[in-house]
């Protein structure tokens, strides 16, 4: 019994410790005035957050379907195995055209028989090597069919590195997920991953503006090395803002400004 009594006493003591506030008249008036206002504000903020989530999180998820490459191809492993590195599989033909993704025949040099114990190699062997079927690789950088792009002026003449436009795919141990736009059927690498359009790397996207941006720089810089050196480039571009004609070098790109410029990239 005594414990129950103690508890009651304790509760009473606790309650008496809490100060009891009685609202003043001033407070009551403020609350009446703000009630409707803060409800509207809250409604607005919630709606704003919901639309942000919709646009930045849900919409991209719905817009893009995610696909895996048919085979988990390991670039890093093969770079060690193949001498001559990239050109061994991605080479220029005699006529200057680019071979693109290697054909099955290029792999057979080493894959007539199984080399290792990896299940991925076995899959490649049984599904493609023995049947003679080409691997249906998904191409991250595939442009729309009305765009003409040639690797030769970029890689052979201007000596641009693969990384500048493709990022570090050549060093990857596993292909990244291919994301396809459900409306246009194009790869997400064209439009980029950042919804706000912020571009941190030269390879983040490859829309028309991104081709233009680099060609435009060519008008103010003499060499490709300068394009890749931000400090010199920015200085020259600043000069170009003030004296556009004086800053233009004769060597600059004519892709954007030349006659029939649209038809340099569109057929
Ligand atoms: C043994 C052959 C081989 C070698 C060597 C090789 N690759 Fe590849 N590469 C492939 C195959 C197969 C694919 C297709 C699968 C994929 O996308 O990962 C590919 C795809 C690519 C792609 C993706 C193109 C696109 O838009 O889908 C890039 C970029 C690439 N390689 C760059 C490189 C670079 C850079 C090097 C040298 C460091 C290199 N590769 C060396 C076989 C090779
Ligand atoms: C220079 C020889 C050579 C060429 C060319 C070559 N491979 Fe390989 N590849 C190997 C060897 C050796 C292994 C086994 C490595 C191991 O498992 O130890 C291997 C392993 C693999 C594997 C399984 C390993 C993994 O985890 O990815 C796949 C898949 C594969 N190769 C696909 C290809 C394809 C596709 C091509 C053509 C684009 C190709 N290889 C061209 C030598 C080559
Ligand atoms: C100036 C930018 C640029 C540079 C530099 C560049 N590429 Fe590309 N690459 C592209 C574009 C754009 C496409 C898509 C072309 C198309 O769809 O018509 C492409 C396509 C490809 C493809 C797929 C081709 C196919 O359809 O089969 C491969 C593979 C590739 N590039 C590899 C490389 C390699 C390897 C290098 C370095 C030697 C390189 N690229 C340098 C822009 C570039
Ligand atoms: C990082 C820089 C860079 C990017 C990105 C780039 N280019 Fe270029 N492009 C060059 C350079 C350098 C040249 C050669 C010099 C010149 O004429 O400007 C060139 C030349 C060209 C030419 C002229 C080839 C000829 O001689 O007829 C075409 C067409 C072209 N680019 C198309 C494209 C397209 C399409 C894209 C985007 C998918 C693209 N380029 C992205 C740097 C770039
Ligand atoms: C440096 C190469 C280049 C030049 C020059 C160029 N384009 Fe494009 N254009 C592209 C590429 C790459 C795409 C596909 C990617 C995209 O949609 O942004 C494209 C897409 C387009 C589209 C499709 C719209 C879209 O965004 O999907 C139109 C329309 C177009 N270009 C019109 C033009 C016109 C008009 C000119 C001349 C003033 C021109 N282009 C010059 C590279 C070029």
Image (tube, helix red, strand yellow):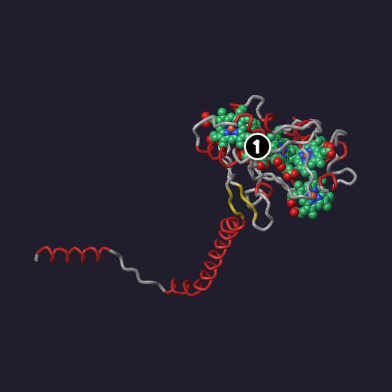
In this rendering, the answer to whether 92 lies above or below 131 is above
* Residue at 44 percent of width and 71 percent of height: 27
Task: Give percent across and percent down for residue 98.
Answer: 75, 36
Task: Give percent across and percent down for residue 141.
Answer: 69, 44
In this rendering, the answer to whether 30 lies above or below 215 is below
* Residue at 82 percent of width and 41 percent of height: 242
Residue 48 visible in image: yes
Q: Determine whether, in the image, residue 160 is placed left or right of residue 138.
A: right
Residue situated in front as seen by the camera: 2 or 262? 262
Task: Give percent across and percent down for residue 201.
Answer: 65, 40
Spot the residue most to the front: 131
Q: Quadrant of residue 127?
A: top right
Circle 1 residue: 104
Q: Determine whether, in the image, residue 3 is placed left or right of residue 20.
A: left
Q: Determine whether, in the image, residue 90 is placed left or right of residue 247.
A: left
Label 1 neighbour load within 10 Å: few <14, some 14-19, many 20+: some
Ligand 3 position by quadrant: top right
Q: Is mark 1 within 8 Å of ligand 2?
A: yes
Spot the residue most to the top: 83
* Residue at 77 percent of width and 32 percent of height: 93
Task: Give percent across and percent down for residue 53.
Answer: 56, 59
Q: Which SS class for mark 1? A: helix
Residue situated in front as seen by the camera: 103 or 187? 103
Residue situated in front as seen by the camera: 7 or 137? 137
Q: Quadrant of residue 154?
A: top right
In this rendering, the answer to whether 113 lies above or below 134 is above
Spot the residue most to the right: 259
């Amino acid at each position: 019994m005594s414990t129950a009594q103690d508890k009651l006493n304790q509760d009473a003591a606790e309650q008496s410790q809490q100060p009891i506030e009685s609202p003043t008249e001033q407070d009551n008036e403020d609350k009446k005035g703000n009630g409707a206002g803060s409800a509207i504000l809250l409604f607005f903020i919630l709606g704003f957050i919901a639309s942000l989530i919709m646009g930045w999180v849900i919409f991209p998820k719905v817009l893009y379907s995610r696909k895996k490459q048919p085979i988990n191809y390991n670039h890093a492993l093969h770079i060690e195995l193949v001498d001559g590195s990239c050109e061994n599989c991605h080479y220029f033909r005699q006529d200057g055209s680019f071979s693109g993704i290697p054909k099955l025949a290029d792999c057979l040099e080493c894959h007539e028989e199984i080399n290792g114990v990896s299940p991925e190699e076995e899959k490649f062997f049984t599904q493609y090597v023995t049947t003679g079927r080409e691997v249906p690789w998904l191409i991250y950088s595939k442009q729309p069919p009305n765009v003409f792009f040639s690797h030769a002026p970029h890689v052979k003449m201007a000596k641009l590195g693969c990384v500048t436009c493709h990022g570090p795919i050549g060093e990857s141990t596993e292909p990244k997920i291919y994301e396809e736009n459900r409306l246009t059927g194009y790869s997400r690498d064209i439009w980029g991953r950042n919804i706000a359009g912020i571009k941190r790397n030269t390879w983040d996207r490859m829309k028309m503006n991104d081709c233009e941006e680099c060609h435009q720089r060519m008008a103010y810089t003499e060499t490709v090395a300068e394009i890749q050196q931000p400090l010199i480039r920015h200085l020259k571009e600043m000069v170009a803002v003030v004296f556009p004609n004086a800053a233009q070098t004769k060597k600059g790109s004519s892709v954007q400004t030349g006659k029939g410029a649209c038809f340099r990239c569109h057929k």
